[in-house]
Image (tube, coloured by chain):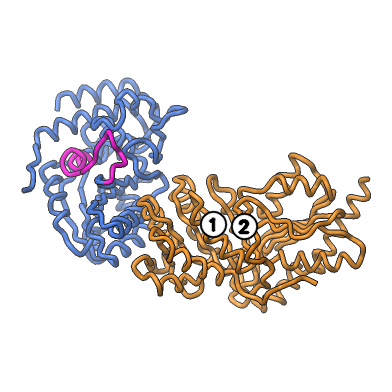
Amino acid sequence: MIQTYGSKPTRDGFGEGLVELGTKREDIVVLSADLTESTRAVWFKEKFPQRFFSMGVSEQDMMGTAAGLALSGKVVFACTFGAFAAGRAWDQVRVSLAYMKTNVKIVGTHGGISVGEDGPTHQANEEIALMRILPNMTVIVPCDALEAKKATIASASHEGPVYLRLGRSGVPLITKEEDIFEIGRANLLKGGKDVTIIACGMEVYEALCAAEALKKENISARVINLHTIKPIDRDIIIKAAEETGAIVTAEEHTIMGGMGSAVSEVLAQTFPVPMEFIGVQDRFGESGDPKELFKLFGLMPDDIVKAVKKAVSRKNAKN
Amino acid sequence: MTKQPNINELKRIAKEIRIEIVKMLNCAGSGHTGGSLSMVELLVGLYFYKFRCEPDKPLCNTRDIFVLSKGHGCPALYAVLAQMNFFNKEELCTLRKIGTRLQGHPQRGLPGVETSSGSLGQGLSIANGFALGARLNKDPKRIYCLMGDGELDEGQIWEAALTSAHYKLDSVCGIIDYNKFQIDGKIQDVKGLEPLKAKWQAFGWEVFEIDGHNLKEVADAYDKAEKVKGKPSMILGHTVKGKGVSFFENKNKYHGVAPNKEELERALKELELQ
């Protein structure tokens, strides 16, 4: 059994972390592009109205304004949905944030298809890719609300632009207070020797469920929470490939250019092993209940189990 | 007491800046001639009269902020910064060459260059951010942002225009180098901007419409803009693309083309006589 402690959206963890930061640090400033309630930036706004600026539905302007504030010595959190942060404002993120290395934390909530009913325009399935290809950018995808809170606080102390990818829907709490969160250092959640499942965000819980199911079939799966996509923890990935010989990545994002691609970039150059990719295929999202969408898009533990078996059989065929 | 601008001295500097611009562009072999020459007085009137900075301490707390939103006009900015001793004039001839701090479009890090730019339309938002930051820091900074006219096609400019007015950012002073051309041709043919003054007024800005080559008008406009309270101000400077060299003026061919050796010699001859 996987131990969980209730369920909460990662955006809530962000909102809590932001309030904690606001209490401790005078230099925290928050901008929101008319999604203050949805991104949970509202919790900061209520406590620190002087350090909150409403930007209206102007994501591009928000990124530029954030850059100017950051160059004035502030640590700025710019909040909107991931689809708009990376899609609408990508060039501003590229030039005004990444190129200038401004100390702005881009908060993209509503990542992935777990957005649900709002449908494809609001489901960010591409932003991990869009953000990680930018030089100087750090990309973090927390797996639960507690990790999101820690990631928020850690981001504020990290110099330079960060993209924080958060979700709308509740996700089981699987990490504990005492677990260490360090940007760039992945967490080993479960040991295993036959295969490694590397997951991020909501897929971490699904990966743990898959590992449980695999146990019954005598497949010992290692599970890694790769919460930081960039800078990527090369060591833990290479070690997993060397020791288990097969890798399955699982992410709530297109399999093209996202976390799985980042892992494969590391392994192709170091220790190539059979790999399978769980994620959104080459298609847009759609409206529906998040759980049903996870089934439709093949992001469930069953899907991971199938991918694991495929990877393991490829490994065995090779040996 | 307001200090008085020394117009003759400013004119002399503007001429020197133009000479440096054409030399630098010729040396680089590429770059934006027309839009660099059109913005000279707008820059000279600012930097050599109004602007607070310490070239030997480029990041000092008491400095004003200048954001070059039309990044392609950077040869003019580089020439001004070198003239003010932010860096050595000899560095100007490294423009656009490998390893240079004088990138083809400005890069933050060169002393005096506050922001990287080149992708149009981003400067005014950054200026607003500086203004909000200064407000939070209780710092009496003034923030200047120079934009091109073609650049006003970008939607982000108008998003930012709303923000400046909404937050009553009276420390923000926008400047438009209204030289009436963009890459594809005359502004009025590519995508008309008129009535431009009325647009900015409607967006809640105090607008000062001036001859952007008349240094008295330029200096006065900066003085007046400083006195505006409760709203941002905009200096709408009517300029001539390629100003100062007869065969560059209003010749849009020189938007993104540098003078060759022969053109440089002719240009220098003309400029020396001014």
Provide the letter of the chain coloured blue: B
Q: Mark 2 and mark 1, same subunit?
A: yes
Q: In screen coordinates, is A105 left or right of B18?
A: right
Task: Verify whether residue B57 appears in magenta.
Answer: yes
Q: Quadrant of the C terminus of chain B?
A: top left
Amino acid type at mark 2: Phe
2 and 1 marks in contact (CB < 8 Å): yes
**From where the camera sits, is residue B252 visible?**
no
Residue where numbered disc 1 is placed: A154
Seen from this angle, which residue lies furthest front?
A178
Place residue B54 in its image quadrant.
top left
- Highlighted magenta segment, given as a residue range: B41-61
Residue at 76% over, 64% down: A207
Where residue B201 appears, as percent x and y from the top left, is: 22, 63
Q: Colour of chain A?
A: orange
Residue B132 appearing in the image: yes
Q: Earlier in the sequence, mark 2 or mark 1?
A: 1
Residue at figure coordinates x 28%, y 42% from the top left: B60
Q: Up-down: is A25 above or below B18?
A: below
Q: Dot 2: few (<14), some (14–19), or many (≥20) neighbours within 10 Å?
A: many
Residue bearing mark 2: A181
Task: Provide the secondary structure element on which disc 2 rests.
Answer: loop
Pick the front one: A89 or A173: A173
Would you identify the image quadrant in which residue A13 lies?
bottom right
